């Protein structure tokens, strides 16, 4: 089977999946990059040495060869190509094609009423609703957006990002944690408003006031970093918070391995949130805003992490405080988080499911996975998602609910 993955550019969030596909398919797998990476992304450390990836071809350098591969491959997975002419040609060909997307309406589904927007969505998606084209939903809110406009009926499936997997011996994740009598929390990402890094500093003030022993590790940089450093210094938190500045991805993972709790405080504008995968893989107890795309797919509340509703800082604070007060009974969630990534939400498993799924498609059958990647994506309105997680309606995500008052 020849397989082509077409997207704007390859990055460290896609490489593990592509490597897994290449190990399985060899020269029959190609990643086609349609544009150079923006300088801003390169400066953030997203740059990739394409010469080290034998399966990558660049459309803007070898257009004829790339278009030929897209036209002739048995299977094509279309991501964010920035070239709708390419997508249209493939989708009209009748050959096995899948699409992958984050959500359409991050700022609110009310935008779906725009006539101009609907026309664009018709041209790009709705017109193919009766064709055998499946949508891989990179985030739990994606299915609702596509369902709202009537695209890909009964052909919406769970998907996401799959970060580099670290595996450990039995008990090793727990042994790697810092043992100095304090709980260590890690926050990692860009210091920008949608990611709410200020929540971590605010939390530090609260924990200090309550007398807890803790340390918060903040990795990343961005526009809010100078003001947060100043705020922490003025609050006398110099001994309680370490600001690392920009940190290479491998170093981020090294720090996560040593920490007990991972905070992910982004709001609804976060399409997926790959650091959730990384925190879970590191055996951290996750405390995550349920509005981010990864949370409903990856987190089973009270089993392998905790989710708080609607960007609610106070609820996040309550959950962290509960962990401090009940750490001996709560720390098992870190082990369960690691097992979730090790066993299901990793590149090797996703690649195997993707190839199985596409082989069935080639036979004219849609056969979803029972759980995890390529299982059916539940269609749940954004406003109901948190309650659905608590009620266990996502099946894959909240069978055993836990709550703190």
Image: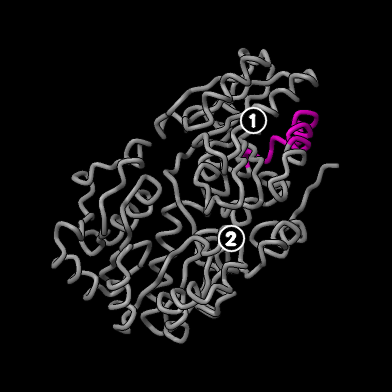
Q: Residues within 10 Å of mark 2 (few under 14, many from 20)?
A: many
Q: Where in the figure is residue 25, as x and y percent of width and height?
A: 27, 62
321 is within the stretch colored magenta = yes
Q: Secondary structure at mark 2?
A: loop
Sequence order check, earlier mark of 2 and 1:
2
Q: Where in the figure is residue 185, as x and y percent of width and height?
A: 62, 28
Q: Compared to 87, does 231 lie above or below?
A: above
Spot the residue most to the bottom: 130
Q: Secondary structure at mark 1?
A: helix
Residue 232 position by quadrant: top right
The disc label shown at residue 200, or none: 1
Q: Residue at x 57, y 43 (%)?
A: 194
Asked whether residue 377 is in view, the answer is no
Q: Where in the figure is residue 83, as x and y percent of width and height?
A: 30, 66
Q: Compared to 341, does 390 lie above or below?
A: below
**Relative horizontal placement of residue 198, taking residue 401 as reference (left or right):** left
Q: Residue at x 46, y 87 (%)?
A: 130
Asked whether residue 30 is in view, the answer is yes
329 is within the stretch colored magenta = yes
Name the image quarter holding the N terminus.
bottom left
Query: Badges 2 and 1: C-beta atoms under 8 Å apart?
Result: no
Given residues 206 and 55, the one toward you in this image is: 206
The disc label shown at residue 140, or none: 2
- The stretch in magenta equals 317-335
Q: Where in the figure is residue 404, as x and y percent of width and height?
A: 82, 42
């Amino acid at each position: 089977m020849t397989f082509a993955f077409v997207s704007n550019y390859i990055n460290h969030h896609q490489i593990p999946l592509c490597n897994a596909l290449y190990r399985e398919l060899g020269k029959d797998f190609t990643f086609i990059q349609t544009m150079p990476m923006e300088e801003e992304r390169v400066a953030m450390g997203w740059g990739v040495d394409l010469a080290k990836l034998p399966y990558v071809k660049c459309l803007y350098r070898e257009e004829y060869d790339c278009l030929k591969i897209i036209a002739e491959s048995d299977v094509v997975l279309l991501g964010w190509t920035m070239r709708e002419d390419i997508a249209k040609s493939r989708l009209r060909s009748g050959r096995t094609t899948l699409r992958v997307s984050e959500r359409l309406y991050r700022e609110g589904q009310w935008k779906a009423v725009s006539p101009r927007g609907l026309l664009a969505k018709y041209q790009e998606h709705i017109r193919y609703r009766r064709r055998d084209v499946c949508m891989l939903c990179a985030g739990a809110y994606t299915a609702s957006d596509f369902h709202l406009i009537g695209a890909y009926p009964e052909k919406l499936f769970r998907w996401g990002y799959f970060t580099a997997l670290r595996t450990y011996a039995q008990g090793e994740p727990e042994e790697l944690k810092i043992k100095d009598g304090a709980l260590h929390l890690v926050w990692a990402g860009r210091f920008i408003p949608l990611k709410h890094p200020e929540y971590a500093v605010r939390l530090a003030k609260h924990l200090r006031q309550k007398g807890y022993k803790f340390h918060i590790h903040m990795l990343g940089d961005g526009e809010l970093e100078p003001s947060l450093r100043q705020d922490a210094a003025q609050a006398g938190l110099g001994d309680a918070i370490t600001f690392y500045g920009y940190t290479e991805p491998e170093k981020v993972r090294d720090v996560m391995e040593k920490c007990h709790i991972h905070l992910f405080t982004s709001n609804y504008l976060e399409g997926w949130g790959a650091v959730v995968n990384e925190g879970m893989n590191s055996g951290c107890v996750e405390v995550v805003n349920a509005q981010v795309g990864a949370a409903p797919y990856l987190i089973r509340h009270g089993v392998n992490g905790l989710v708080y509703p609607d960007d609610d800082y106070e609820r996040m604070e309550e959950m962290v405080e509960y962990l401090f007060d009940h750490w001996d009974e709560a720390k098992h969630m870190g082990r369960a988080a690691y097992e979730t990534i090790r066993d299901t939400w990793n590149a090797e498993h996703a690649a195997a499911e993707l190839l199985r799924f596409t082989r069935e498609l080639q036979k004219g059958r849609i056969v979803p996975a029972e759980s995890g990647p390529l299982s059916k994506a539940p269609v749940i309105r954004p406003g109901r998602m948190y309650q659905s997680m608590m009620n266990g309606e996502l099946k894959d995500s909240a069978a055993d609910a836990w709550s703190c008052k």
